[in-house]
Amino acid sequence: MNARNPDALDKGRIKVLLNGEVKQLLVDDGGGQLLSEAIVLWGYADKKIAVAINECFVLKQDYVNTLLVGKERIDIVRPINGG
Amino acid sequence: MTQNTQFEVGGEELSSRMIIGTALYPSPDVMKQSIVASAADVITVSLRRQNPADDGGMDFWQYTKQLGKKFLPNTAGCHSVKEAITTAQMAREIFDTNWIKLEVIGDDYNLQPDPFALLEAATELIRQDFVVFPYCTDDLVLCQKLHAAGCDILMPWGAPIGTGKGLINPYALKTLRSRLPEVFLVIDAGIGLPSHAAAAMELGFDAVMLNTAIAQASDPVLMAGAFGKAIEAGREAYLAGNIQPREAAQPSSPVVGMPFWHQEENF
């Protein structure tokens, strides 16, 4: 287990829920992974998206300061048709 | 000459009194043609989870962006204050607008808004500098409280979403118009026919929001144009001032000078 993050799966990995699906992330020495890095890893880099973690909105400029440490519920949304 | 001149809503100059939705069309091309035919200035849009392998979000974004319309994002599907507020915040970032069509559903069967959660969410979003377009019922007290909370625009339903029943409670709607004269009132939901939209405008409503009635018509483009004409006609009728209904017939042609009148008595 990671010393900083007791929710880590094992050394070097954490688990999060992305749009309802379990995802594993490699973590650095800080015990987590930056949201900005995870977004690139998941293929959202060039997409028109917005993000909420645990139902709280995260501003785009805060992605680089937001550390995922495990067990977060992440919602990434896109524009769609609506009435 | 049309009476539908420019007016200001939520800090924006508009000229059309129709707000049109972007859902349920048979194809993106039909959606685009219908929006053009409607001449609406404002289109409603939404947010859903994005699978990175799916480029649908980008396609929709680019497609609608080209239309040059003002976006009115909604919080459709939200059932709690927190969900609605977070969705509004995400919509503000994606669509680059502080307008939000606030929907907080209280009953899944008829998609009736939860008035208590709606008021709470509206109050918080206004505090966060949103321009809130609350989808509400036609309840006078709720509408008064939303207005007191800072909503200068209200979107009461004509009937439950997608039913096409028209204005099921004209008395309540007429009451809203007379009691909230300074509020920009938009009929949202339940409209099925252009005549329903015209009736709403004749009551003095300021605009009509449409989606299903256009998108699911046999010919959405033709129906969009029909609604545009009906809304304009209803608005002009309201401005023109209608006659008061009466019980007894009254001839429209002059009586004086009628040939054969009392002919036999005067012979």
Image (cartoon, rainbow, N blue to C red):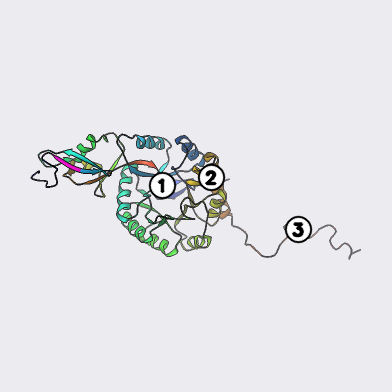
Q: Is residue A65 visible?
A: no
- Left or right? Give the position of A71 relative to B266: left
Label 2 is placed on what type of residue? Gly
Give the residue at x 42% y 38%: B68
- Left or right? Give the position of B111 relative to A72: right
Q: Which residue is at the front of the view, B193 or B163? A: B163
Label 1 packing within 10 angstroms: few (<14), some (14-19), many (20+): few
For the record, the magenta segment spans: A11-15
Q: Which mark is residue B228?
A: 2
| Residue linked to disc 3 | B254
| Residue linked to disc 1 | B12
If you read the primary sequence from the N terminus, does the residue marked by circle 3 or circle 2 appear first?
Answer: 2
Q: Would you say residue B264 sits in the magenta stretch?
A: no
Is the residue under label 3 in contact with that under label 1 (CB below 8 Å)?
Answer: no
Label 1 is placed on what type of residue? Glu
Outermost residue to the left? A3
Outermost residue to the right? B267
Q: Is residue B1 above or below residue B179?
A: above
Q: CA distance from mark 1 to mark 3?
A: 49 Å
Label 2 chain ID: B
Is the residue under label 1 in contact with that under label 2 (CB below 8 Å)?
Answer: no
For the N terminus of chain B, give its image quadrant.
top right
Q: Which residue is at the front of the view, B231 or A32? A: A32
